[in-house]
Image: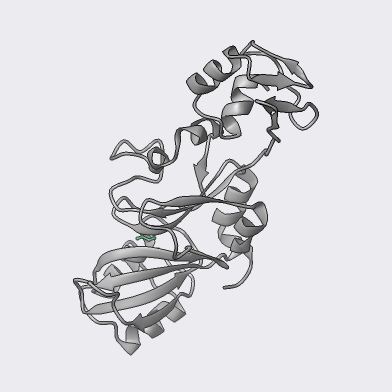
Amino acid sequence: MRLDRYLSNMGLGSRKDVHKLIASGAVSVDGDTVRKKDAAVLEGEQTVSVNGREIRYKPFVYIMMNKPAGYVSSTEDADGPPVTELLGGSYCSYGLGVAGRLDKDAEGLLLLTNDGDLIHKIITPDKNVVKKYYCELKSDISDEDVEKFASGITLRDGTRLKSAALEKTVPEEGSASACAAVVGIREGKFHQVKKMFFAVGNEVLYLKRLSIGGLRLDPGLAKGGYREMTKEEAEKVFSRE
Ligand code: URA
């Protein structure tokens, strides 16, 4: 790996920042000062230090974000600023992907990582990872809706969905709606929760993801806030809530 990429991946700044750092003579590899930004480094084998502090290589990053409304989860979607814009510059070079997208107007738990295997495992429907959403609704839910969700909703386009848990809840403080529910789904189809409520004649006015498997949104994260997780914490997605 190039030295500039190594340092930028390890959070020492943008490529431009690390070029300055390297040129200043602050960076050494196995004890020797290196001033070439494209010098090759064997990550995990050689010791890279900045101003004498060892910078250990971490191959994967796992980030939990509290996505705010107005940002798009995909970098290919031109419909708004991508969530990656909310991250500090040092994460740009990681090539982060999103494990389970959220709509532009939706908020809550978003997992970003460059661990492609983890993303794949989370989004494959046969893993049965339950995603829980808090929803504010136009109308109240009925016992019949709960039963329909439990036996598997058929969307208006004919798509048959897996069983989903629907539970009435108290709207959050300051909510504009008098009706709220928590729904747990095991698939991740496009606009799935909105379409499920639409299929029973209701409408989602606000949507927030609370958890993915056993990984819950950190209540300490403000909207737009994020923090790194260990791989072990990220893998809570495969444990039950
Ligand atoms: N279901 C939706 O309708 N939207 C989301 O963002 C996630 C699940």
For the N terminus, give its image quadrant: top right
Q: Is residue 180 visible?
A: yes
Q: Is residue 2 visible?
A: no
Q: Which residue is at a point 46% across and 59% down the rendered structure image?
A: 188
- Side (left or right) of 81 relative to 89: left
Quadrant in the rendering for residue 144: bottom left
- Side (left or right) of 202 relative to 71: left
Compared to 47, does 232 lie above or below?
Answer: below
Name, please, the residue furthest toward the front.
Answer: 52
Please provide percent x and percent y for residue 66.
Answer: 41, 56
Quadrant in the rendering for residue 175: bottom left
Compared to 24, does 205 lie above or below?
Answer: below
- Side (left or right) of 49 relative to 240: right
Looking at the rendering, the quadrant in which ligand 1 lies is bottom left
Please provide percent x and percent y for residue 196.
Answer: 34, 69
Q: Which residue is at a point 46% across and 51% down the rendered structure image?
A: 226
Q: Which residue is at a point 31% across and 35% down the rendered structure image?
A: 78
Compared to 113, does 8 lie above or below?
Answer: above
- Side (left or right) of 176 relative to 47: left
Name, please, the residue furthest toward the bottom.
Answer: 143
Please provide percent x and percent y for residue 241.
Answer: 57, 73
Coloration of the structure image:
one colour
Please state which of residues 139 and 50 is positioned toward the viewer in this rendering: 50
Q: Which residue is at a point 46% across and 74% down the rendered structure image?
A: 164
Please provide percent x and percent y for residue 73.
Answer: 40, 46
